[in-house]
Amino acid sequence: MTDAVARIGILEDDESLRLYLEEVLTTTEGLDLAFSEGTVAGARLASAEGRLDLCLVDLKLPDGHGLDFVGHIKATTAAKCLILTVLGDRTSVLLALRAGADGYLLKDTPPDLLRSNIFRTLRGETPISPQAATFLLEMWRAAEPATVPEQSEDALTTREVEVLKLFSRGLSYREAADTLGLSQHTIGDYVKSIYRKLRVHSRTEAIFEARQVGLISPLD
């Protein structure tokens, strides 16, 4: 994102909540309302009009599922998707993250925390509501770490693991580059290699898979 003001879209079928989200965005310095729609079809059309930096996405919608829209956004734009839903169950959380969602919040998130999490997502972080994070931690504890052969061509290098750890702590490309004394271009090369080796398509998926196989811990 190069402009100072981020353009945010809303996909939410509850009219009162949609109006509330519009007010949060329009009263927050640095954020601008790109569109506000109550259906997947409407949001798909609106997302094609002008620059889009982030979408707040509900999951249960009258004409489809929010993750269908997430897939569309990821395939057609560089925008981020922050899930905002009442669904805090394990399946919904995991499906959203695997679909490429950049964060997962519940609708009872207070407005100030919602604002800060929008900015965190724009910076490349992955905010997750405590209830959703608890599920991920439980899964990590219950999962038997897979063995990654050290000599495998798909094994992550020490530097690639370092990059993933920095990302899991919420650092951006630039911040990771500064921390490791590398260029952002080099960090980008590491990320491409990580995605290929872990067979993922987003930072969220990469962090999740790395935790599943024991490369990084929930505290990293």
Image (spheres, grey):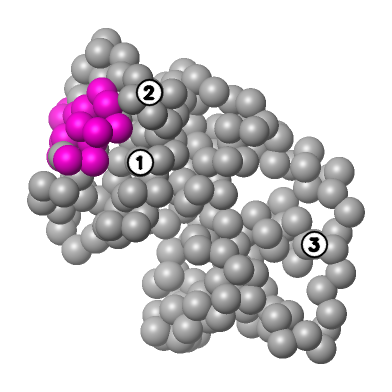
Element under disc 3: loop
Q: Earlier in the sequence, mark 2 or mark 1?
A: 2
Instruction: Find residue 150 and report its image quarter.
Output: bottom right
What residue is disc 2 on? 61
Mark 3 crowdedness (10 Å alpha carbons): few <14, some 14-19, many ≥20:
some
**Residue at position x 67%, y 31% from top?**
90
Instruction: Tell whether position 36 is magenta.
Output: yes
- Residue 28 seen from this side: no
Q: Amino acid at mark 3?
A: Gly
What residue is disc 1 on? 69
CA–CA distance between discs 2 and 3? 36 Å
Q: Nearer the viewer, mark 1 or mark 3?
A: 1
CA–CA distance between discs 1 and 3? 31 Å
Q: Considering only vertical position in the picture, is 195 above or below 186?
A: above
- Residue 64 seen from this side: yes
What residue is disc 3 on? 214
Residue 22 relative to residue 104: left or right? left
Image quarter of the N terminus:
bottom left
